[in-house]
Amino acid sequence: MLINRRFFEVLLLGLFFIAGCSSAPKAQTPLTTLQGNQGGMIVYGQVDGATTPAAAMAHILRIVQNNCGDKPQIGRVFRVKGSNSDAVFFTVTNRNQGNQPIAGEIIAAPTGPKTVEAALVSDSAQRFGTTLNPLQNQLFGVWHPGGAAGGRAVGSRASGSGPAPPEQLHQIWNQDHSALIAIPDGWVVQGNGGTTFAREPNYNAMINLNLVRGATANPNYRPYGGMTTGMGVKMVYPANVDPVRGFPGLIKEFYRVNNQRIEFRMESGEQMAGPSGQRCVHAIGHGLLLGATRPLPPNITEKDYWEMEFLACTTPPNRMGDYGVTISTYEIDPRFVDRYRATMAAILQSYQVNQAVVNQEASAIAAPAIAAIHRIGAEATERMRANDIANDQQHADWRQGEDNISRNTQSVSNYLLDQTVIQDNNMYGNGTIGHGTLWNNEADALVKADPNRFEYVTVPNYWRGTDYVP
């Protein structure tokens, strides 16, 4: 599961309890617990032993983890405007009660030289976006840390500060029912084979989950047919490099083979344990994804790069040096980071793969591939007996097949990139026809504005050398 650990030091230091999790330890000074008027749970009081807000939040998170059997996934810690208190949103799966997704907010406020009070509001992840404000209003009606007047300003959302909580989510299958994901209303979901893509309607936030690519550590690898990018091409990258230090190079090659280019500045990275001997890296940074030949837009600087978070896992290489790479990632436009970061964490936590469907599809793909191998062998034998005319025809068919593969590969790449090929029927105002590949939203805008001039181009009508590389 992809997690946000930009403030990992808080998580390592580690409350109370949340709706559905077990109660706080007996050694803790008694805490006040309230049921939310509209659902959810409220807990507040002094945190024993905590001398800073960070230590109080860490203590709370550690107890949440112990009680729920799962490590909380936290957003960015923020200072509440007009106060000396800190707050953070989190999500956690309650493993002890049917894997129920829970979301909450923790607020910690100093009340003396070495004393801190804290409060937690929580509810099920699907309800939290609706119940957060009523829970906060109820909390600040009774909780005034250190007896301060106007306690509402300590953590009230009315101050307009800090990241937004997760939006309300609803579950939805991707196209082939191979994965289930929870998204806000209006978001778009695509994907199959376990791979899933979700985006905000205006492309301000996007998630790609379970992207898979074959890789090889063999530097002498040459793809069949001379192709250097596309679905059947392996990425070439050493399997024995340090996972964290090698991560920028790994994702650069991953996207290059996918006919994309990434500009990425890693801010932090850590190696994580993976399943079945896999090596996994959790990395956070800022970057941009571009088409393979698309230059950076003018006047773009690193401050305009999108927030990116990755979880990349590699399988152990076989004796031929071949291995697999799986990447999950999210991207947020820098203008909308506070709005969507907590929502991203909730979406990521909701992701579930339907392995039965994935296995069935893999078997369906493998059977034709095996038959194709036998067919190719039979055709090779027949070619040795055929005359020159038959050979010429066969070569022509092969070239056409390769051309079709290139077209289809480009179509898949355009799909993954959210790009579309369009035709301009009056390119220079003199009737000249031209083709171009644009982002989906740009293409949609042109076709909608002037459908007589601009039209979508289907895969069979791609221009060789313009819309795809043969």
Image: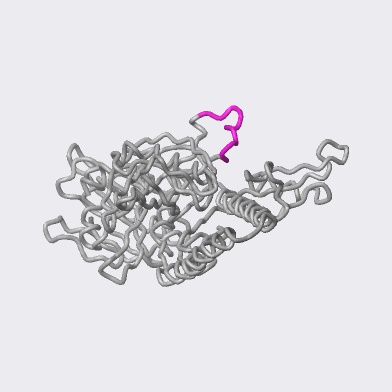
Q: Is residue 285 left or right of residue 424?
A: left
Residue displayed at 84% across by 50% down: 452
Q: Is residue 320 left or right of residue 447?
A: left
Is residue 137 found inside the magenta-colored segment of the image? no
Q: Position of residue 129 (x, y in %)?
A: 45, 59
Residue 265, quarter of the rendered image: top left
Residue displayed at 52% across by 52% down: 231
Q: Quadrant of the C terminus?
A: top right
Q: Is residue 427 left or right of residue 240?
A: right
Q: Is residue 198 left or right of residue 426?
A: left
Q: Residue at the left extreme?
A: 27
How many marks are shown on the rendered structure? 0
- The structure's colour scheme is one colour
Q: Residue at the right extreme?
A: 430
Q: Quadrant of the N terminus?
A: bottom left
Instruction: Tell me the chief SS of the magenta region.
Output: loop
Residue displayed at 30% across by 44% down: 148
Which of 77 and 154 lies nearest the eye of the viewer? 77
Is any atom of residue 439 visible in this view? Answer: yes
Which of 144 and 49 lies nearest the eye of the viewer? 49
Q: Which residues, given as a range, are shown in magenta?
A: 291-301
Is residue 292 found inside the magenta-colored segment of the image? yes
Q: Position of residue 2 (x, y in %)?
A: 37, 52
Is any atom of residue 284 visible in this view? Answer: no
Identify whether 188 is placed above or below 307.
below
Q: Position of residue 251 (x, y in %)?
A: 42, 42
Residue displayed at 76% across by 50% down: 447
Identify whether 42 is placed above or below 462.
below
Q: Position of residue 11 (x, y in %)?
A: 26, 47
